[in-house]
Amino acid sequence: MPKLVRKGCKLVGCGSAVPSLSVSNDDLSKIVDTSDEWISVRTGIRNRRVMSGKESLKKLAVEAAQKALEMADFDPNDLDLILMCTSTPEDIFGSAPQIQRELGCRNSPLAYDITAACSGFVLGLISAASHIRGGGFRNVLVIGADGLSRFVDWTDRGTCILFGDAAGAVLVQACDAEEDGLLSFDLHSDGEGGRHLGAPINDNETDELLGSNGSALDFPPKKSSYSCIQMNGKEVFRFAVRCVPQSIESALEKAGLVSGNVDWLLLHQANQRIIDAVATRLDFPQEKVISNLANYGNTSAASIPLALDEAIRSGKVKPGHTIAAAGFGAGLTWGSAIIRWG
């Protein structure tokens, strides 16, 4: 019988892209009852990027992907798989195949979307590792990209101050087990909490289509649409500061590590208060916490790869550094991964 050889996977390239339009807190104060101080004190956010003109999520995703491939000096024709982690695709059937086309992949690698909101990129990393370790794939491109500005009620100061648009990407490559860059992970979902954060289809539109006995009153159905983002901020905060530290602790235990062994803490960039509370719970000093929330706001699935890319290109994160990363958000979903860069 052939001997089973365990494969590893490593992160070898990263890239990111953001829209050109920057919207400051002062800009928002002109359209809703708020102020720079009110927003920054409660969230840590000062600016966010918003798609405008001819910009699109697909273009941002392609730009981020190209930068990741360039960093790794990698030919897109050698990709085996493209994972597009997004909850805001520009095609209801998914965006990944279009990104594959724009990258010029001639060998028709598999490409599909993953929908898990702000946890999407972490799930994408784990999916990439699973394809490599168990499916024989060697080169997987993981993209996190979201355009939540299109689903924001810009008259609601409770939500419009939070979100921005961006894309980030990482190239994950097969390697020997000794070089493995995904040390452990921990993933969860809780549908009961879904009522606290979501953007469901408008109920009044579907209700009008059915009679009391389920018969169609209006056929063919009217065009459906989704509501703007609805969030119970207090409940989401409680969920994040309770569940995220537990998940990271579980992942650290699986990896045989403690927080002192980790070089960086990289959380989904949702709210600085959440980031600070989780860091305190895990005894991470502020100098070991990666945060670019002030400049971009909450970019959902893009937030972790965007922050990672900036930290790597600035020289903060170096090859061999260990990172505890965690995503959390709508679903509710949350998960963490202990990764090593390079």
Image (cartoon, rainbow, N blue to C red):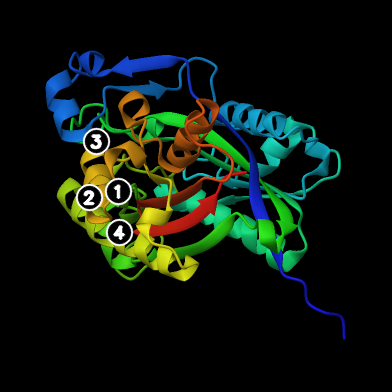
Real-space Cα distance between discs 3 and 4?
24 Å
Label 1, on which residue?
284
Image point 27% across, 48% down: which residue?
Answer: 279
Mark 1 near mark 2, Cβ–Cβ under 8 Å?
A: yes
Q: Is residue 167 visible?
A: yes
Real-space Cα distance between discs 1 and 3?
29 Å
Real-space Cα distance between discs 4 and 1?
11 Å
- Quarter location, residue 190: bottom left
Nearer the observer, disc 1 or disc 3? Answer: 1
Q: Amino acid at mark 2?
A: Thr
Residue 254, compared with residue 313, is above or below; it is: below
Q: Secondary structure at mark 3?
A: loop
Q: Pinpoint residue 126: horizontal percent, then vertical percent.
A: 56, 58
Q: Is residue 33 visible?
A: no
Q: Secondary structure at mark 1?
A: loop
Label 2, on which residue?
280
Real-space Cα distance between discs 3 and 2?
26 Å
Q: Which mark, by number, is residue 245? A: 4
Q: Is residue 91 left or right of residue 274?
A: right
Which residue is at the far front? 260
Q: Earlier in the sequence, mark 3 or mark 2?
A: 3
Q: Earlier in the sequence, mark 3 or mark 4?
A: 3
Crowding near pointer 1: few (<14 within 10 Å), some, many (20+)? some
Q: Pinpoint residue 206: horizontal percent, then vertical percent.
A: 36, 53
Real-space Cα distance between discs 1 and 2?
6 Å
Q: Earlier in the sequence, mark 1 or mark 3?
A: 3
Q: Nearer the viewer, residue 36 or 27?
A: 36
